Amino acid sequence: MYNFKYVAKREFMPLKNELIELIHQVQDQVRDYFTFRFDFVGSSQRNMITSDNSSNVGFDFDVNIQVNDDDEEYGPKEIKHILMNGFNEILKTNNSKYDYCEDSTRVFTIKVKDNENSKIIHSVTLQLFIIAKMVVNNILNLIKNKILITGENKAKGFINYQKNSMVKN
């Protein structure tokens, strides 16, 4: 049974501010490779953090990272590893209470753990968005040519193109 409760702002706000400072340090760390912006999303964006007191996972912050690699020098895996290495280096240098990055398929996570009680106090899930010039140019060309992209076949890895009859010249 879930037992969700709101986390008091006085409890999570200092941690959120500490996290913002950490991300700023990582921005400086990886600046030779590329730049990025970040946004808190979901409940952390609205400052409505919840925690399930009956579990051992604590509460979490969700952060989107939008990478600006204008020259498209790095692939998605490289970008992810550069960011993870940047976070790990800053966490190590600062002797942070966050554990090292944990890699997942589409995201990576940093956590503050209570190892004695086998409990996660709180975590941060970081999701990457990489906007490539080629993709932007293709989207602009599709719009210009009055083609609509639908996600019907997204799960299969296909994009279904349909003429958009609603667009007028």
Image: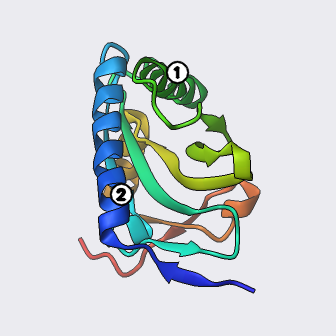
Would residue 25 appear left or right of 162 to someone viewing this image? left
Query: Quadrant of the image for the N terminus?
Result: bottom right
Which residue is labeled 1 in the image? 85
Q: Residue furthest left?
A: 169
Task: Answer with mark 1 or mark 2, whichever residue precedes in sequence.
Answer: 2
Q: Residues within 10 Å of mark 1 (few under 14, many from 20)?
A: some
Query: Residue sitting at 37 percent across and 16 percent down?
Result: 33
Query: Residue sitting at 31 percent across and 70 percent down?
Result: 9
Q: Residues within 10 Å of mark 2 (few under 14, many from 20)?
A: some
Q: Position of residue 84 (x, y in %)?
A: 53, 28
Would residue 81 appear left or right of 34 to someone viewing this image? right
Q: Position of residue 28 (x, y in %)?
A: 28, 22
Q: Is residue 100 visible?
A: yes
Q: Position of residue 112 (x, y in %)?
A: 55, 45
Query: Of the numbered discs in the image, which one, if any, rests on residue 5?
Result: none
Of 26 and 127, nearer the camera is 26
Query: Of the numbered discs in the image, which one, if any, rests on residue 40?
Result: 2
Q: Position of residue 55 (x, y in %)?
A: 70, 70
Q: Residue furthest top?
A: 32
Q: Is residue 145 visible?
A: no
